[in-house]
């Protein structure tokens, strides 16, 4: 995953409201009106959050009759998780080498 794409993904997920929107969309597509209901936000504010998520590639919107439901782009989340898992393996390896080194110093 490209560094700028990864940065945009994490920046978009840095806001708790956007994380809650992503969690809601994981259960299925939703319109702005449906996404507004659990929050004390206007539809315009939710639309702005959706725009940030869309710019990061986490959400797409499509025209469906009179509505424009938002859909979660799971592939982008999988890419971020893949990057995190690779770092986790790297960090675990470093931790294991450090622990082995420290045991050798005793």
Image (cartoon, helix red, strand yellow):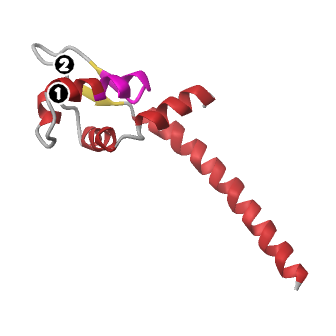
Along the polypeptide, which appears first: circle 1 or circle 2? 1
- Magenta segment range? 49-60
Is 50 magenta? The answer is yes
Would you say the residues marked 1 and 2 are in contact, meaning their CB atoms lie under 8 Å apart? yes
> What's the residue at 16%, 41% (across, down)?
39
- Which element is circle 1 on? helix
Q: Which mark is residue 74?
A: none
Residue placed under numbered mark 1 in the picture = 32
Residue 14 location in percent, x, y? 42, 41
Is 76 magenta? The answer is no
Residue 20 location in percent, x, y? 28, 44
Query: Dot 1: few (<14), some (14–19), or many (≥20) neighbours within 10 Å?
Result: some
In terms of depth relative to the viewer, which is nearer, 44 or 27? Answer: 44
Residue 42 location in percent, x, y? 14, 29
Residue placed under numbered mark 2 in the picture = 68
Residue sitting at the far right: 105
Is 54 situated above or below 91? above
> What's the residue at 22%, 32% (across, down)?
29
- Which element is circle 2 on? loop
Q: Is residue 74 left or right of residue 91?
A: left
Q: CA distance from mark 1 to mark 2?
A: 8 Å
- Locate the N terminus by quadrant: top right
| Quarter residue 101 falls in | bottom right
| Quarter residue 46 falls in | top left
> What's the residue at 36%, 26% (across, down)?
52
Query: Dot 2: few (<14), some (14–19), or many (≥20) neighbours within 10 Å?
Result: some
> What's the residue at 90%, 80% (across, down)?
105
């Amino acid at each position: 995953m490209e560094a700028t794409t990864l940065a945009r993904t994490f920046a978009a997920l840095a806001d708790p409201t956007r994380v809650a929107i992503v969690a809601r969309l994981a259960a299925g597509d939703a319109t702005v009106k449906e996404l507004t209901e659990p929050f004390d936000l206007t539809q315009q504010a939710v639309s702005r959050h959706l725009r940030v998520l869309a710019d990061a590639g986490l959400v797409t919107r499509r025209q469906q009759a009179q509505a424009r439901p938002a859909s979660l782009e799971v592939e982008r989340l999988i890419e971020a998780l893949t990057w995190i898992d690779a770092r986790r393996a790297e960090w675990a390896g470093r931790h294991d080498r450090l622990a082995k080194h420290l045991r050798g110093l005793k």
